[in-house]
Image: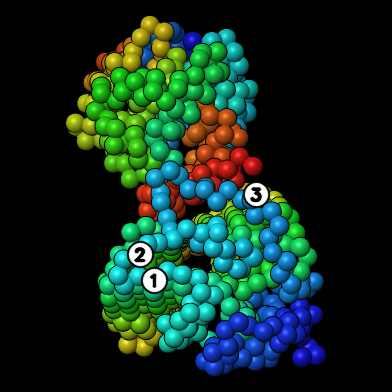
Amino acid sequence: MLEIKNLHARVGEVEILKGLDLTIGSGEVHAIMGPNGAGKSTLSYVLSGREGYEVTSGTVLYQGKNLLDMEPEKRAGEGVFLAFQYPVEIPGVSTMNFLKASVNSVRRYRGQSEFDAMDFLKFVRRQTKVLNIGDDMLKRAVNVGFSGGEKKRAEVLQMAVLEPTLALLDETDSGLDVDALRIVGEGVTALRSPERSMLVITHYQRLLDYIVPDVVHVLADGKIVDTGDKELAIKLEKNGYARYAEAAA
Amino acid sequence: MGNLSKSSQTFIKQNKAIEFSCSEPWLEQLRKSGLENFSVNGLPTPNVEEWKYTSLKVLDNIGNGNNGVLDVDQVDLDWLPAGLETHKLVFVNGCFDKGLSAIGPFGEGIKVLSLSEVLATEPALIEGYLGQIGSVEDLPVLALNTAFIDDGLVVLIENAILDKPIEVVYVSQGSGNTSYHPRNLIVAKNNSSLTILERHIGIGDDTYFSNNVSEFIVDGGSYVKHYRMLEDGSGGVNLSTVNARIGKDATYDSFILSVGGRLSRSEVHVACQAEGAHTNLNGVYIACANQHMDHTTLIEHLVPNTTSNESYKGALDDKARGVFQGSIIVADGADGTDGRMSNKTLLLSDDAEIDAKPQLEIYADDVQCAHGFTAGELDEEALFYLRSRGISDALARSMLVEGFLTDAIDSGVDEDFRGIFINRISEWMGR
């Protein structure tokens, strides 16, 4: 599904990713944990194609294709989805219209028929129920005035309706209280399937209580420095990242 | 007179030659004061501080003829959505057209009619009001309009609520030398309430000059909502001056969408004159090609406990130029004033330009005033967010621009009227 080899990337003059290797198989859920500044968000932006993140060497193959050559919208069409750590507010654009434009764009790309307004409403309502999202939230402008929990639920809703094959979740647990964390965690877990891989980027282990990963990696100083199963996440929670920071230094 | 521009001289000559049908002494005196004051300096030039960013050079070759509108049937006068019924007054190159209009009946306390009709039948009705607000010494464009007072809209309402909005349509068609000066007077007293929807629309690409002035007296708990849509033809020059005087617990609430014309300037002066007076001045301007749009406002808080809220948003493409000059004056002793002003402009091309000039003059102590101004390109982060959801760069950009503009409609326009303005913006987006 995803094969990252020796990835180096920088922002401005600062090198952030320094030879990252990562392979994710179809249907697998991988977690990347690591201290602040390790390069976790940079990895998610490089994979989703944000401007300003320059890949200096290495390759990223997604379903056998060179992901780095693609514009962000093409990546979305190909099935890559990034749940943002800080979802962006878009005044004047209703969440419903945004979702419809987005879903119909990727459906067009994938050669599927576009939804009309009625069918789309039905399609969205199937997902909003699970995520406890009311019609009222769909009428509001994208993320404008949303609480932390609402923003993250809206991200998971987008993930559900865009039906990605590779979902990147960037600190999806940040800013959530216990109840919101549970709704989001269960929402994401419900979307697990043999055709859908996930990369869950997080600082804390708590999200992984809900989204139980197949593989856990530790990212420090721009490289994967340790890999294990879900027990590794629990160990990290107890012992912290100090030993990786020392090893990296 | 030797120093005046050619067009200013033409206006003066033309004015002297006109024989107005109504020659009440007080009105003659009013026109005379307009002409005299206009004759001192003529049309303003960029040497005048208030006109630094807007040049009226485009009027150099304008005359003062009025050949009438030739193709009025090209304008869809039934443009409002079904269900939105109005009292409609149509002015064709500044002259009231009874055949195209449909007004009334009105209940007690309400008079809605054309100025020409008032002047022909009951000029005394407006004698105490017309020309009372705004100084012809300070505003040469107002002085010019005053010299030509002849037709326009008159609304007098007292202790009444208007059942339907008043729709005023100004249809213009240039034929090289067309200019006219409609004058509107709206007086709302004693807990009255009304909505006016004013539309300026042009036919063809020829040059014309519409110099329209509106006086609003809103008093005693009354509420006036004033919508304006400026859709002049590509050769149209539209100078719109609004002078409003707000009394106790009264509100003047306005929204303008500027989209048409070669050059437009909307100048709004509001004076909050008694406690509880409130004004909202909101607007959206969208310009492309070589259009020039100027929004100049002055809000005066003259007594304690008055409030104002002002927000203008725009998008400028190609070589379009926008001007926003917003002034708030809080007079000595006007404690408890709350005044907010904001202006945000999206520049969609490297050649587009906005000149924004905020001005706060505060002479009282206990005052809350704030202003915020931004001008720039689309938010890159928002653009990436949309593209990461599969939306193409082009569609993402247009969604962001439209969202930015319709956001202003949501806050400044009542639900019944939103569709009209949002559709006009969508049309512009798809141009």
Amino acid at the residue labelled 2: Phe
Give yes or no for contact between labels 2 and 3 (Cβ–Cβ under 8 Å): no
Foreground residue among B350 and B193: B193
Q: CA distance from mark 2 to mark 3?
A: 30 Å
Q: Secondary structure at mark 3?
A: helix
Tag of residue B111: 1
Establish if A231 lies above or below B38. Answer: above
Residue at screen point 54% across, 42% down: B426
- In percent of width and height, residue B403 lies at 48, 44
- In percent of width and height, residue B6 lies at 79, 80
* Chain ID at mark 2: B
Amino acid at the residue labelled 1: Lys
Q: Which residue is mark 3?
A: B74
Label whose residue precedes the other's in the sequence (1 or 3): 3
- In percent of width and height, residue A69 lies at 63, 22
Crowding around mark 2 (Cα neighbors within 10 Å: few <14, some 14 to 19, many 20+) is few
Label whose residue precedes the other's in the sequence (2 or 3): 3
Foreground residue among B44 and B179: B179
Q: Which residue is mark 2?
A: B106
Tag of residue A90: none
B37 relative position to A231: left or right: right
